[in-house]
Amino acid sequence: MDAYTDTRVTKASVNYGPGMVDGDRCGICTHYCAGPGPRKDYGRCELVLGTIYAKAWCRLFEERPDAADQKGPQDQKRDAA
Ligand code: SF4
């Protein structure tokens, strides 16, 4: 394997789908890279292949340290419960 081998996995293998009820989603995941300009809700992931929607989720989700600032009041209430 050389340094340029793509080691990302498929969406199906990590249960990629709609965001979680508690607010966990790609947009606040440490592995998410937002797209440019008006398409910022569609970006890339360090671990998963293909275009990634900011409001989706997969089982490799890891919340960014600053994610609490980006969750709405309802998300924060659910996290505290
Ligand atoms: S690891 Fe999963 S939850 Fe995180 S950005 Fe990639 S696809 Fe989304």
Image (cartoon, helix red, strand yellow):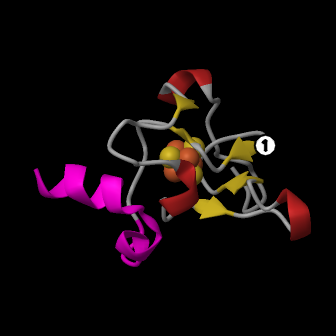
Where's residue 23, x and y in %? Answer: 40, 48
- Which region is colored magenta? 64-81
Which residue shows up at 55% across the image and 51% down it? 26
Q: Out of 48 and 22, give the one closest to the viewer.
A: 22
Give the residue type at disc 1. Thr
Tell me the quarter of the picture where residue 27 sits: bottom right
**As displayed, is residue 69 above or below residue 62?**
below
Query: With 27 as the anchor, is 35 left or right in this view?
Result: right
Q: Is residue 69 magenta?
A: yes
Where's residue 70, x and y in %? Answer: 47, 69
Which residue shows up at 89% across the image and 63% down it? 38
Query: With 14 as the anchor, is 35 left or right in this view?
Result: right
Task: Kindly report the secondary structure that dominates the magenta region of the rendered protein.
Answer: helix
Q: Which residue is mark 1?
A: 51
**As displayed, is residue 63 above or below residue 42?**
below
Where's residue 4, x and y in %? Answer: 78, 58
